[in-house]
Every structure is written in structure tokens, then in C-alpha cells.
Amino acid sequence: MTRYILTRLSSLLISLVIASIVIFGLIEIIPGDPAAFMLGINAQEDTIDALRAELGLDASPIARYFAWVSGMVTGDFGTSYTYRTPVTEMIAERLWISLPLALIALALSTLIAFPVGILAASKRGSITDTVIMGFTQLGVAIPNFWFAMLMVLVFAINLRWFSAGGFPGWDDGLFAGLKALTLPAISLALPQASILARVMRSALIDTLDEDFMRTARAKGLTQRQAIRRHALRNAMIPVLTIIGLQFSFLLAGAIIIENVFFLPGLGRLIFQAISQRDLIVVESVVMLLVFAVIVVNFAVDIAYALVDPRLRRKA
Amino acid sequence: MTLLRIENLSLKIRGIPILNDISMSLDEGRVLGVIGESGSGKSMTAFSILQLLPKGSTTTGRLCVDGLDTLEASEEDLCKMRGNDVSIVFQEPMTALNPLKNIGQQVAESILIHEPNTKRSDALERAQEALQRCELPASRFPTTLYPHELSGGQRQRVVIALAIALRPKLLIADEPTTALDVTTQAEILGLLKRLVEEDGMGLLLISHDLAVVADMADDIVIMKDGQIVESGAAASIFQELKHPYTRALYEASSHVPERTQQSARRPLLTVRDVVRDYQLPRRSLFSAPEHFRAVDHVSFEVFKGESVGLVGESGCGKSTLTRAILGLEQIQEGEVFLNGTVIQHGKQMKHSLRRQMQAVFQDPYGSFNPRHHVGRLISEPLHLLGEAMTTIDKQETIAAALRAVGLTSDDQYKYIHEFSGGQRQRIAIARALIVEPELILLDEATSALDVSIRAQILDLLADLATTRGLTYLFISHDLSVVRSITDRVLVMSAGKIVEEGATNDVFERPRHAYTKELIAASPTLP
């Protein structure tokens, strides 16, 4: 097990190094000089040069790469070209919205998908199964921003249970923050839950056909007990894979929902940074997201090994 | 006392009759053998006893296990019965255990289900005892092992241990040794016999293999197409062979096809000093990887027109050697020659060389693309001939190949799922024959077939060898088949050829200890 973790950990580090080189390289290739952009079209050549020197843009690419990486390791992501504020602060502020939002959406999605998928699989071919599968089909098909607008219409405008958008900040108390994130989280969770329920169902159905399920029944377990004790853990491998992918998506891909609900999250930050050519912010946020994806994959790998003893090689 | 009594049992699954008016009974301490070919309903009889039938099953008749009528009983009563009064051992030990739980947990679970007040530690201790009784001593097989750390035979012992943990009155064994090697088979059968004697259990032994059942059973039931064709005491059934189906089955099991030996002294295939090493995963990051030698300096020759058998148990290296001969496996040392031309490994083989050698594999379904029709499947090797064929010529060639294996030319328009197992194997042979090769490698080519079908395929192979002067390398773990169709036999063990000689000599006067063990372990018909 220790060896397994070490191998995974080393592949995590290698992935991070490669990703940082690729991201830095891509930003280098993109045309446009941030200094010129910041100063506008009428700026003097020497003013631009002075700004370039101030921003550290006159150093060689290799030196800048190492400065960038060593800064990130110590938590210093540099200063935004546009806002002249530390990128670390900007990201931290946004992360406090995006991370809870992703976590809540993921929790919701899992809480809905597991029981629904299990129910459909254990009643395969029945009316219940058909109805559940119909709803998940619908959940995958409906665009989540449309569903979000529908919810705003019902719960914010008509019923007035929630506000239609915006985020009061965590300073107003946990409840106010959670309340503001509820509708966005539900809109994000719906398609994810539908996908996850379908994966859960098919993984479980595959497991139910395995020979060891017959052995379990022949031991005297009821169908329910057999599913709980023998089938679920075996069906978890594909489900964990999907959960890992979904978390990464929820963290970075919430931009449309953030816009619908006017939430200052990471998605909107990166969108603005790109349009303002605030490359250092783009670089840092992308790197952060890559880091999150790689760490989540690492966590999923560890979870595989916890579930499946065949993956834990003896040390 | 009568333990199991089945009276006029009929079973339909979604309206299709599966069992028809079955009656049998089994007393404590006795062994009842149920023999039948695939589709005879023997496994469905077992599942009827446990009431673990597929959805849409309807049963009529009476089925009493130790006084409980399982057709009438509630699901709750059935759950109490399963694993406690009646247990079952299945055919596939590789998949019958949950891969995520250790063997101690799985055996202890049987105990905990039926005696929920038992402490976990006590249940584990009893699980250890059950494993011990199945000859898995605690010193070498602690309860913390997982199924993937055990061999097929050892897993089957675990399955048996969890079946007998509560000392059931009735044990059902459904093809318990079909997936195992002969020596392992002999051990498992011995174990079952001992457990039956020790606990006074009744054993319902289901098998397609007459010889296995003949060795074990007191009484025998022979099934065909969901009906019982004959039943009675084992000794009298095999002596009298009254029913024509029983006689046909018996003859097919010991069938020896008529062949004329026609070998010239010209070597067709020469295997010289072949070595195949597999790299094992590194023990630690910096140590050099170790190697596993699957084929260890193997040399032999196959002469033109000869039929040579290669026997050995699973893991002995015979499949690796087969792939090496076909040029599909990288070898580390040695050479393989076909008709004097060396076979280069890791390179695309010349078409002119490839067409001289074809193969037929074990699984006649898995080795065909189900989305292509038979004509396309069997004409695939034709490109090896090097010249483009006209459509008419091609169709004529396909039709001729199908007729040669006893099918009709119209069969080329059908798909593979429309054929039975035996017909599929005929199609596999047709695909090998179509380029008129000299050598055919038959890798367990009859192992998945029922005895009567197997006899037909062996006849076909013998026939083709005579009319076309074919040479066979017959790779199998089934000694009786190899004995019936080969002139010469090679015995392989742990990557080496340990004995070689004329088939009859080797079987009658084995010299090497391993060959002796193999022959002694394989069950024989009375």
C-alpha cells in the first residue's frame, strides 16, 4: 500500500511539473504584451519598457518560469496586471465561493444518485427502473443554465424563498452563505446526479450478474443483503472515476451558473482575466485548477486501492 | 433417511420448457451423480432445489429438502435453508468469490448469517477450522488472504469451505472440477468424498464427465433435453448400458477416431532450444527486475503428416509455446523453423510462411467477430495467398471449405450466433483450412465441447488429416483426447518437456514421475 501511494505520488508530481511547463509555454506563445495593454495605445515606448521591467517581464523566459513556480510554491502568485492586487488574495476570495459550491453540488449529486441508481439496478426492467431512467435522461438533456433560470423564477421571484443571485459573503454567517449557494448548487448537481445515477445503475447491474453474487445468495443472504454486502463495493470503481471527473468539472466549469446567479467565483475570474489580458491571473488560476484536478485524481486512485485489495501491492 | 426428493418437477422459464417431469431422490451419506450434456437441465435442477432460478421461472411438482417443500416455502424459510441445510459449489472458482473480501470474512459470513449471535472472532475461528478441513492449513493460508492470491484449486477449496462451514445435510456440486487441471481435480474430488463420509452429507454431483461421476457416485441420473433418460445404481448403469443415449454417451467419451498414420520423416516444424522469459514487476524502485521463465529450453520436431500432442497443466507454458510457434510471442533464445524457414518473432510474418500454419482455439464463440457473416469470417486468411481472387472463385473456395467441415455452402450468409458450439468449432476449422495449410495448431480445440460433439469433431479432424495430409499439433490438458488422436506426445511441466514418445508407449509405460502423476489423476471410465 505504501508503495502504491508513493508511485501515485511521484506520478502526481511529474504531472504537475509537465502541466506548469505547458501552461507557461502557452501563455508565452499568446501574442500581446501585458505592459502595452495596461498602458493603452498612446503609451510611450520607454514607459512600456519601464513597466515591463517593473513587472519582471524583461527577464528570460526560463528565469521567469522559475520565478513563477517558486512564487507559487511559497503561496505568492504575483500581482495582477489589471488590478494591481496580489493574485493570491484574488484567488483565495473566489475559491471561498467556488470550493464550497463544488463540494455542496457534489454532495447533492452523490446523495441523489446513489439511492436512485441502486433502486433502479435492483429493480431492473421494472416500471420503477423505466421511470428513473426516463428522469435521468431528462436530467442529462436539460441545459443547467435553463434549469437555473427556472429555479430563479420559481423559488426567488414567485416564492421569494431565496435571493435571485449575488453572494453576501461568509461574514454574514454560515446560513446566509449556504442559502445563497443553494440554488446554484442544485442547478449544478442535477445533470451530474443524472449521469452518476446511470453509471451507478449500470455498474451495479454488471456486478449483480457476477458469479460471486450467486455464491452470496446460496449462502442464505437475501437479495438486499447480498447487494449491500457484496455488490456495492464492487460497483464503486467506475462510480469513483466519475465522481473524480465531476468534482474537477464542478470546480472549474461552473462559469455559466456563476453568471446566472451573479456569483464572484473562479470561473468568472478567469473569464474576466482572459478578456483583460491579465495573463498572470490566467496562468495562476489555470495552474490552480490543474493542481486541483491532479490532486482529485490522486485521491481517486487512493480510493480505488482502499476499495480493491488487488490494487494494493504488497510492500 | 431421504434427504432430497424430487417428484415430477417441471420448470419453464418465460414459457420455454427447461425441465420436464424430473424425479430423483437422495439419501443421507450417499452420492447421486447427475450426468448430462450442455442444455440438459442439470444445473437448472440444482437451482430449482435452492430456488435461485432466473426471473420468469415457473415450477410445478414437488421438491422436498429435509421435509421442506422448497416450491411452496417462503423466501424467509428459503434463506434459512440456503447455506445452512443445503449448500452449493459452483463450476467457476475464479469468479465465485468476492474479490474485495478476504477468505476468512467470506467463510465467516456463512456462519454469521445463520447464527447471528456468534461473536465475529468466534466465527473467524470457525472459518479457519472449515478452511483447515478443506486442506488449507492456517500456517500457509491465513484468513486474511484475498481470492486473487490463490490458485483456482485453492479458491475452489475456499468455496467448499464456505459451503460446509455449517455442516449442511445436502451439498450440491455443480461441475466442481470442470475448470481445474486433472491433478487438482483428483484432489478436489477426494476432498468432497472425504467430507461426505465425515459429515454423513448427501452429495448431488453434477457433471458432463462420465468418468468423474463414475468414480464418485453411488447412484446415477442421466439427463437429456430436460428429461431423465435413465437412472439407477452406478455400477449397473455402466455395466448394462441399457438406454441408447447412455450407450452413445459412453461411447463418445471413449471415442477413438479411425486414423491412418502417414508420417514422412521430413520435419515440418522444428523448435530448437526455445526460451521465453517474462519480466516480473520490480521488487523495489532500484532493484533489477526478476524474470519468470515460462518456456525453458524446449526442443522438438513435428514431422509432415504427423499428429503430435502437447499435454500439461495450466501454467506449464504450453500456451506460451504455442504463441511462440505462431510467431506471436517474443522469444529470448532459440529458433523455430517451419518447413526450413525461420520464424522471425516480433516482425510481420511473410504471407507465404503464415499460410502454411493455421490455428484453431478453444473458445469457438470468442474467436469470431460476431458482426461479420461466416463467409467473411472464414475468407479472412485468403489474402495470404497473395493473388486477388474473383468474387466467384472466392465464393467457391468458401463453399468448398464449409462443405469440407460438414456444413453447407449456404451457411456462409449466416452469423456466428446462429450456430451451436460444435458448428462454430467446425467453422473455426474451415477458416484454418481455407488457405490449405500444412500444419494446424489445435489449442484446446475440443475442450469446450460436449462429449458427443467432441467425438464428431475428432472424427472430422482425423478425416481431414487422412484426405489432405495435414499435420496437427494438438495442445490440450485432456489426456483422453490426446491419447485418441495423436501418434506422438510431449509432456510439459514447468516450462520444460519432461517426456516425449509414441503416444501409446507414454500412456502405458510413463517414465517420468510427472507423467505418472498426470495419468494416475485422470479419471477413467469403468
Image: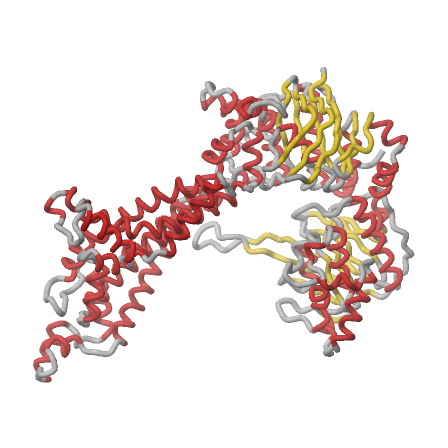
Decide: is A165 above or below B107: below
Residue sitting nearer the eye, B490 or B522: B522
Residue under the image location 18 percent in, 62 percent down: A77
Q: Is residue A304 left or right of residue B432?
A: left
Residue under the image location 82 percent in, 62 percent down: B403
Residue sitting nearer the eye, B471 or B427: B427
Residue under the image location 31 percent in, 45 percent down: A108
Decide: is B236 above or below A134: above
- Residue B91 horizontal/vertical position (percent): 65, 38
Colour convention of the picture: secondary structure
Decide: is B144 above or below A170: above
Screen quadrant of the N terminus of chain B? top right
- Residue A211 horizontal/vertical position (percent): 58, 39
Q: Is residue B183 left or right of residue A314?
A: right
Residue sitting nearer the eye, A2 or B414: B414
Q: Is residue B473 left or right of residue A177?
A: right
- Residue B216 horizontal/vertical position (percent): 76, 29
